Amino acid sequence: MEILVCVKRVPMVGGKIVVTAGGQDVDTRMSGFTVSPHEECAVEEAVQIVEREGGSVTVLTLGPPEAADQLRDMLALGAKHAVLLETDGREWGPMATAAAISAVVSRAARRADSEQGPYDLLLFGNEAADTGGYQVGIRVAHALGLPVATGIKKLARTETGFRASREYRGVQESYDLTLPAVVSVKEGINLPRYPSLPGRLRAKRAAIDTAATDWQAEGLRKERLRVPEQARKRAEVIGTGVEAVPALVALLSDLGVLT
């Protein structure tokens, strides 16, 4: 079974968000980078499937040259091939991203002698950790005319494909998908393994297939980015000991804590 997993290079969470002077981008010069947690689970799910069924896993990302580091992290988890659709660093919208991925899948399907594809299963994270768009997997499925299931927390093999299950508003839903198919998975479908030392060494030496891509504009136009203002913290010293109690009660009343 040949599986393609699409991942995205995203800033690590937890740091302070700073917008560039032009207000068009997030300043990531001091940020570390990783892949989205949902996508790491997608890679783990793909590796587990080929360990049971045979085949290989290809990881693909659309991003700057530095995104090769994230591809190597996924190779260290057990993926066999890596493809980098190299950009100039600008953020691509979901329509253009899906179009670029669909083109790669279509080319692989036409090349019967290709070592990578045609793909039986396309896995995505349910959403990227930075933009949270939820769109790319669905758009790829639509472009390729493939069945798709999203928000999946369990994949089980069937005679004709996979049964994809999820919980929605307290109700368990299952979908039987024939192959080829597109599935986006959520964090928690599995527990991603830690890369082994041999895996890291193989990933460091592995070749990454790279293809240049031209930036494609979409219908939406970005005006500017703005970091929401943080609520100001109010701190007052009202005294110490019993003598400070009346002032404390007055302050709590002023804040609306007392009724």
Image (tube, rainbow, N blue to C red):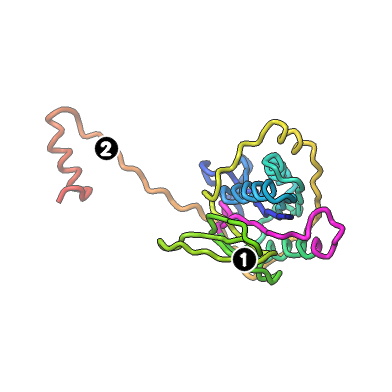
> Which residue corresponds to the image point at 59% horizontal and 42% vertical from the top-left?
192
Q: Amino acid at mark 2?
A: Glu
> Which residue corresponds to the image point at 68% horizontal and 64% vertical from the top-left?
179
- As drawn, 237 above or below 153: above
Q: Which residues are magenta?
A: 107-132
Q: Is residue 15 visible to us here?
A: yes
Q: Helix, strand or loop at disc 1?
A: strand
> Which residue corresponds to the image point at 68% horizontal and 44% vertical from the top-left?
74
**Position of residue 59 measured from the top left corner of the image (x, y, whole percent):** 71, 50
Extreme residue toward the top, this view:
241
The residue wearing badge 2 is 236
Q: Nearer the viewer, residue 13 or 183?
A: 183
> How far apart are the alpha carbons under marks 1 and 2?
61 Å
**Position of residue 101 measured from the top left corner of the image (x, y, whole percent):** 72, 61
**Position of residue 202 measured from the top left corner of the image (x, y, whole percent):** 76, 36
Select label 1 or label 2 by which is in front.
1
- As drawn, 201 above or below 82: above
- Mark number for residue 243? none
In the image, residue 177 lies in the stretch drawn in magenta: no
**Position of residue 90 measured from the top left corner of the image (x, y, whole percent):** 69, 55
**192 horizontally vs 241: left or right:** right
The residue wearing badge 1 is 177
**194 horizontally vs 63: left or right:** left
Q: Nearer the viewer, residue 122 or 84?
A: 122
1 or 2: tag closer to the N-terminus: 1
- As drawn, 114 above or below 47: below
